[in-house]
Amino acid sequence: MSENVIQELGLNREALRAAIQEEYGAVALNPQQGFHFHTGRPLAQMLGYRDAWLEGIPEPSIESFAGTGNPFSIDAIQTGEQVVDVACGAGIDSLIAAKMVGPNGKVIGVDMTPAMLAKARHSAAAARLANVEFREGYAESLPVPDGWADVIISNGALNLMPDKAAILKEMARVLKPDGRLQIGDLVVQKAVPTSAKRKIDLWTGCIAGAVLETELHATVVKAGFVDFEITWRDAVFDGAPQQSSAANFGTLGINFRARKAVNQAEWDAALEALSVAELAEAHPVARFEADAFYDAGDKGCADGPLDEIAALLQRLSPGQTLEVRATAPSVAADLPAWCRLAKQELVTHQGDRYLIRRG
């Protein structure tokens, strides 16, 4: 996670990582206890994993499966290819990929949770798969050389990571030109507010880090990819043993693919092809030439944005400006009053846009 993203969200990087490791350590050590997500062989069947793929995969890796999609349904993994499985967990997808690439191919699984890695390594040995290796590491700094991989797979992990742009750029580094992303993850149909993104339990609950489809699309393309496509969507948390906030945000499991641009010209064309609507929703366009921008959406001042505005102003130097977008009608009266009390200058107000200069 980059320090900028962590600071913007007010998160403690090590505390978040520790909480995620604790949650998925429990999935490794006690997969039958019941979680806010489905697990194991029933989940694999729900996500369309073929029986043939699971043949020869040791049960310990299957029982700790906690994915949200099916990377293998997106495109075939070819014999002889080199594959990286990011946040591989107990190794089910890595082991399936190792069978697909055969002895002339290679799979590297990367994870940060020791209990998951131990289970994955034990399963690889039990399955006598010599063409798969499991390495401890973070998605932000994959222990894989530049341009090594033909394919990167990942399943249910990108949503756990705050700085998706940095992680996708790292995936682009590891892929060969024209290399493929085949990823199962989550999206939300209602944006998760910044206040919720500051709650670690919502990160481990797979909610805080999920983004809108348009934001995911823009982030993937800006990291160096082309041909982004979501190939499948489903409500994967429905009926899970423990209750979650997934339904509140319209959370869906997805499969998506993309391809690393072959050259700068191909990437430039993909960037141009991003629609104005997608870019506007993913990154609301500022109207004023302010030093910082904050989108409060439809939240009124009583719903929390004043704290976020105050925190952003504190990061600015005196005299610098912050543009605020807020569509709630009450803000037109409440924000000027707050500026007077907080000794901040409301420079101008045009429609749903407010320009504040730090005092």
Image (spheres, grey):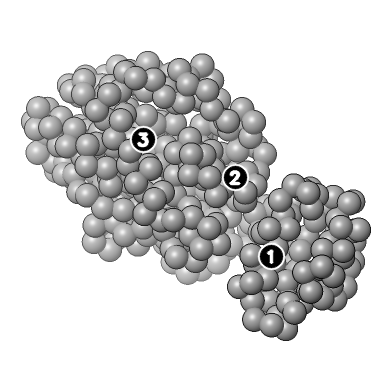
Kind of residue at badge 3: Glu
Q: Which residue is the site of mark 2?
A: 196
Quadrant placement of the N terminus: bottom left
Q: Which residue is mark 3?
A: 23
How many angstroms separate mark 2 from mark 1 (CA)? 17 Å
Left or right: residue 130 versus residue 256 is left
Query: In the rendered image, which residue does mark 1 sit on?
Result: 310
Left or right: residue 281 versus residue 143 is right
Q: Earlier in the sequence, mark 2 or mark 1?
A: 2
* Residue 187 circle label: none
Point 86% across, 57% down: residue? 334
Query: Which percent across, then down, holds residue 54?
Result: 26, 21
Mark 1–mark 3 Cα distance, whole angstroms, equals: 33 Å
In-front residue for pair 342/88:
342
- Which picture quadrant has residue 293? bottom right
Single out the mark in the foreground, 1 or 3: 1
Determine if residue 238 is in view: yes
The x, y position of residue 239, in whole percent, is 51, 16
Q: Residue at x 77, y 69 (%)?
A: 342
Label located before the other in sequence (2 or 3): 3
Q: Residues within 10 Å of mark 1 (few under 14, many from 20)?
A: some
Q: Mark 3 falls on what kind of element?
A: helix
Q: Determine whether 212 is above or below 168 in the image.
A: above
Q: Position of residue 108 (x, y in %)?
A: 22, 46
- Which residue extends farthest front? 341
Label 2 Cα crowd, 10 Å radius (few <14 / some 14-19 / many 20+)? some
